[in-house]
Image (cartoon, rainbow, N blue to C red):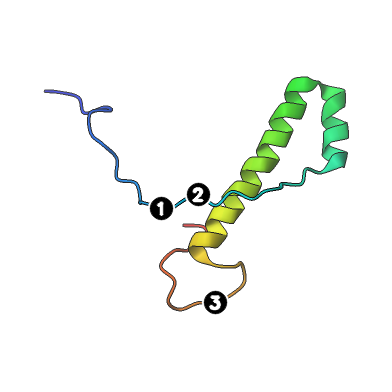
Amino acid sequence: MSKTYQKTETDTPDAPGVAVPERVSVAMAEIAESMQEGLLALAVGAGMQVMNALMEADVSALAGLKGKHNPERVAVRHG
């Protein structure tokens, strides 16, 4: 019996390029609150906001704009 952990390649879709926004805005009120908690909280909070913006951009690219109905779409927002 052999284990297949990390011995097989995963199928990933071939994308021409990853669309990354030039700017991501970070809420200043959350930054001020995080600074009181410390540098780690600030870094985690800013990173989470950036990841949320990137994930939302990816979802919009795959599933279309939120609230717009498209009967030809193949992807959905939440599963």
- Name the residue tied to disc 1: 15
Q: Position of residue 9 (x, y in %)?
A: 26, 36
Q: Is residue 38 above or below residue 74?
A: above
Kindly identify which residue carries mark 2. Answer: 18
Q: Which residue is mark 3?
A: 69
Quadrant of the rendered structure where residue 16 is?
bottom left
Instruction: Please give left or right for residue 59 compared with residue 21 in the image.
Output: left
Verify CB contact (< 8 Å) between mark 2 and mark 1.
yes
Residue drawn at x 81%, y 21% as measured from the top left: 38
Q: Nearer the viewer, residue 49 or 14?
A: 14
| Amino acid type indicated by mark 2 | Val
Q: Earlier in the sequence, mark 3 or mark 1?
A: 1
List x then y, in percent, for residue 74.
40, 67
How far apart are labels 3 and 1 at the CA level? 24 Å
Q: Secondary structure at mark 3?
A: loop
Position of residue 51 relative to residue 37, above or below, is: below
Q: Nearer the viewer, mark 3 or mark 1?
A: 1
Q: How many marks?
A: 3
- Contact between labelled residues 1 and 3, with CB atoms less than 8 Å apart: no
